[in-house]
Amino acid sequence: MARAATTTDVFNAIAEPGRRQILDLLVHGELSVNELVEQLGLAQPQVSKRLHVLREVGLVLVRDDGRQRYYRLNGRALKPIHDWIRRYEQMWNERFDALDELLEELNHEED
């Protein structure tokens, strides 16, 4: 199975931990490249490269203000990821419910 390009697939884009770190920072609000560089402790080209990928898949939006570029999270682009994970929610809940029942039975046996 061919692997989707990092710049066309949101799942591949978030597979890289550094890109997820940027998203984690942007969840609190808009930041400039310089602010991201400072908070991540990385060189500007490394941050810009990651921002480029995130921008290509639509996970971040950019706004120019003079010489500064400000980035913000585009939550709508995370929806495919949320929808995919949600498919497994029922399975997790059923397993946790079964575990709770087992623990309750074990507690009653001890009493």
Image: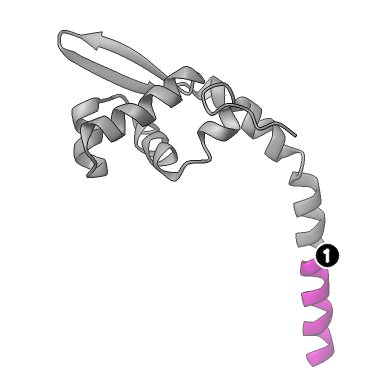
Q: In the rendered image, which quarter is residue 9 located in?
A: top right
Disc 1: which residue: 98
Identity of the residue drawn at 38% across and 31% down:
50
Residue located farthest toward the left when viewing the structure as drawn: 67
Say if residue 111 shows up in the picture. no
Q: Amino acid at mark 1?
A: Ala
Please say if 20 is above or below 106: above
Identity of the residue drawn at 57% across and 21% down:
8
Q: Residues within 10 Å of mark 1 (few under 14, many from 20)?
A: few
Say if residue 69 shows up in the picture. yes
Identity of the residue drawn at 47% across and 18% down:
56
Identity of the residue drawn at 77% across and 68% down:
100
Q: Quadrant of the N terminus?
A: top right
Residue 20 is situated, as x and y percent measured from the top left of the image, at: 44, 39
| 108 inside magenta stretch | yes
Q: Which residues are magenta?
A: 98-111
Type of secondary structure dominating the magenta stretch: helix
In-front residue for pair 67/78: 67
Residue 83 is situated, as x and y percent measured from the top left of the image, at: 69, 31
Q: Is residue 111 left or right of residue 37?
A: right
Q: Quadrant of the C terminus?
A: bottom right
In-front residue for pair 85/96: 85
